[in-house]
Image (tube, helix red, strand yellow):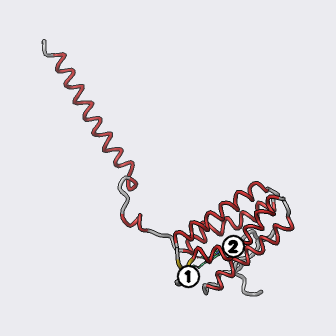
Amino acid sequence: MRRRPFMVVAIAITAAAILAICLAALRGVAAGPEATPSPHAIEYLPSISDLMIATIQPRHERLWQAEQDGNWEFAAYELGNLRGAFDRLGRAHPSEHDISFPDMITSVTEQPFKELNSAIQSKDGTAFAKAYADLTAACNSCHQALNHSVVEVRVPNRTSTSDLNTDTRN
Ligand code: HEC
């Protein structure tokens, strides 16, 4: 009978240990692939076209939408994000057809980005429209230069906020 307190403590310790092991195992399962990323997941590099669709195109459209809605603050925000997306794209793909991709990006987008920035700062819709058209032309000039002229980007409009022109009739 004198041993009973010891038994209670021993059982409690054993129970606690089993619980700890179960919790650790559960956490391992819950964390899943993130706990040990497979080498393939690390090596996956989205292509230029993946990034165009995911990071460039939607921001090009949102920038237009923001100005249409007169939301200059959001336009400034999207312009900043679009520039950042182009920077990251250039870093992820340092060259294309043996030409420096970041240099190509800068050479065509630098001027329109400057003009867009000052149009947004001065809330000037006319200047914005011109700069936005220049940026859109810059998109297409690179597509043409890299033999992807089939990708024709346009200024969205009230009937379609898409910036993609897939209509061959015009
Ligand atoms: C410096 C060059 C460059 C600039 C600037 C550029 N692009 Fe691209 N873009 C490419 C290349 C290269 C591809 C095609 C990649 C491929 O298919 O391998 C492409 C493809 C695309 C595609 C098609 C992706 C697909 O899979 O359907 C879209 C949409 C696009 N660009 C949007 C834009 C927009 C919008 C802008 C301007 C805001 C822009 N791009 C500016 C180089 C550029």
- The residue sitting at 65% across, 65% down in the picture is 83
Estimate the x, y position of residue 48 in percent, counting from the top left: 55, 74
SS type, badge 2: helix
The answer as to whether callout 2 falls within 8 Å of ligand 1 is yes
Image check: 51 left or right of 74?
A: left
Quadrant housing residue 40: bottom left
Instruction: Name the residue: 21% across, 26% down.
Output: 11
> Where does label 2 land, which residue?
109
Above/below status of 31 relative to 111: above
Picture coordinates of residue 29, whole percent (x, y)? 35, 49
Snapshot quadrant of residue 2? top left
Kind of residue at disc 2: Thr
Residue 99 image label: 1
Which residue shows up at 75% across the image and 87% down it?
169
On screen, residue 91 above or below 26: below
Callout 2–callout 1 Cβ contact below 8 Å: no
Q: Which of 106 and 72 is in front in this view?
A: 106
Residue 104: give x, y in percent of width and height. 62, 78
**Left-right relation of 131 to 144:** right
Local crowd at mark 2 within 10 Å, few (<14), some, or many (≥20)?
many
The C terminus sits in image quarter: bottom right
Quick check: 6 left or right of 38? left
2 or 1: tag closer to the N-terminus:
1
Is residue 2 rendered to the left or right of residue 164? left
Rendered location of residue 152, percent (x, y): 69, 80
Image region (quadrant) for ligand 1: bottom right
Q: Residue at x 60, y 71 (%)?
A: 52
Q: Distance between the residues labelled 2 and 1?
A: 16 Å
Give whichever of 37, 32 is nearer the camera: 37
Q: Could you say whether the residue bearing mark 1 is in a helix, strand or loop?
A: strand
Q: What residue type is labelled 1?
A: Ile
* Beta carbon at label 1 within 8 Å of ligand 1: no
